[in-house]
Amino acid sequence: MLGFGSKPRVCIVGAGFAGLNAAQQLKSSKYDVTVIDREPCIEWLPNLHEIISGRKNGEELKLSRKRIMARLGHRFCQNTVVDVSGTSLLLDTGDLIAFDACVIATGGLDDFSGVPGAMQFAYSAKNVAGCQHIAKVMRRATLGHRTLKVSVVGAGVEGVEVLGEALRAYRHRPQLEFQMVDANKQVLSQCAGNLDNAVRRHVDKLSVDFCMGNGVASVEKEGLYLQNGKTLESDLTIWAGDVLPTKQQWGRVSSTFQSHRFESVFVVGGAADMPPILAKEAFHAIDMGRFVAMNVERLLSGKRLKRFDPATKPQVVSFGDLDTFMIFNGFSVSSSMLGAAKEMVYTLGLLQLSPPTNPKDFVNTLDVFQRSMRRVYLPTLNPVSMMGKLTRARLLT
């Protein structure tokens, strides 16, 4: 069994947003922290859909986990955890890592809802490789004369952002036709304001169809079968649904994120099977990571654990260059100028997670800012463009 030092030992399984933010809160001067993930890089999820339009190339959205951990003074192990107990983790190498407290933040699984063929024939937009493939297929379609029918399954936040980026690049290309499919009758049905009407209005004269109110029964290579018996031709199916908890025996947690099975284990984010009162949207992952680190410290010092209360913060949803929505509790604001603000926040967040440590890194950082300025900020800050966009800003209730 592997053990390290005399400081309290904390293991973090999964180095996504929640896991990395938990690691940032646990200082190496006080804790011996080991972070475990099977992948060497974290992918910056908020901008993945921009790979589809070519605004991002994919590789610029990958950050080295080993480098991030080294900067924090923690240990990174590129392994897979195959079993969890109340005192140790079993790795795929056969090694055991002992801990005094453990945080599991492995994320969820794509929710294919048991739809036959979905995993085989649909492409996920939740990773760099999937988005790169989607972009490649659509780019190739513009070189020929055959029509490519693209289906986006899921009319929630991810589906809208994916469709928006596809339309940014290809809405004037006659070779591509788009359709959005969802069991709900409205786009962004869980969001405040009549965003369904706003989205449809933007695409009224474009090659976009909405097949709403019927879920997908099965996915085939050449198309979709809906639950009402209707068939839809689809050459490229993009799955933009939710994520499911991993449903492990230790995954059921209380509102403190403490596992019901092991008091020394905490589970957050998509890996947690949480009570329904707790929202699990991706934009809570950073808050969850910081909060669970605080509860780990409280557990190790013998203090009473605190309950997680999700922040009531607005969510920003981009629809390509056509519009951006800021969604509050009870209403939404629509303005394409919000897209530049979102890009700035996400660019700063990306750089904050892995700041430059040498001249080469600094040059790469400047390059990221330069590309963001050229693609987003400068077109938006053009005085003529600003005046036009200000007049189109709307309050949606």
Image (cartoon, rainbow, N blue to C red):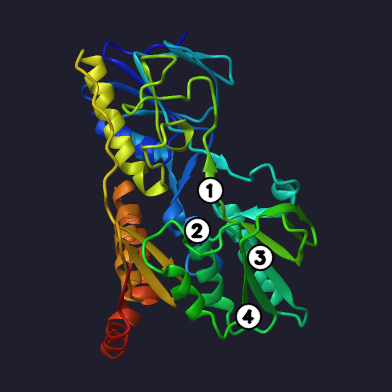
- The residue depicted at 78 percent of the width and 79 percent of the height is 146
Q: Secondary structure at mark 3?
A: strand
Give me the C-alpha separation between circle 4 and circle 3. Answer: 12 Å
Under mark 1, the amino acid is Asp
Q: State the quadrant of the C terminus.
A: bottom left
Q: CA distance from mark 1 to mark 2?
A: 8 Å
From the image, tell me which residue sits under label 1. Answer: 242
**Outermost residue toward the top in this view:** 1
Q: Is residue 120 left or right of residue 393?
A: right
Most extreme residue toward the bottom is: 384
Residue 23 versus residue 314 in the image, above or below: above
Q: CA distance from mark 3 to mark 2?
A: 14 Å
Q: Earlier in the sequence, mark 3 or mark 1?
A: 3
Front residue of this view, candidates 243 and 92 = 243
Disc 2 target residue? 156
Specify which label sits upstream in the sequence, 3 or 2: 3
Q: Where is mark 4, residue-wise?
A: 207
Write the residue at 65% across / 55% down: 215
Residue placed under numbered mark 3 in the picture: 151
How far apart are the two marked residues, 3 and 1, measured between alpha carbons? 16 Å
Residue type pointed to by label 4: Ser
Please name whichever residue, 76 or 264, is drawn nearer the observer in this view of the structure: 264
C-alpha span from label 4 to label 1: 26 Å
Q: Give the quadrant of residue 143.
A: bottom right
Q: Report x, y in % for residue 242.
A: 53, 48
Quarter of the figure with residue 297: top left
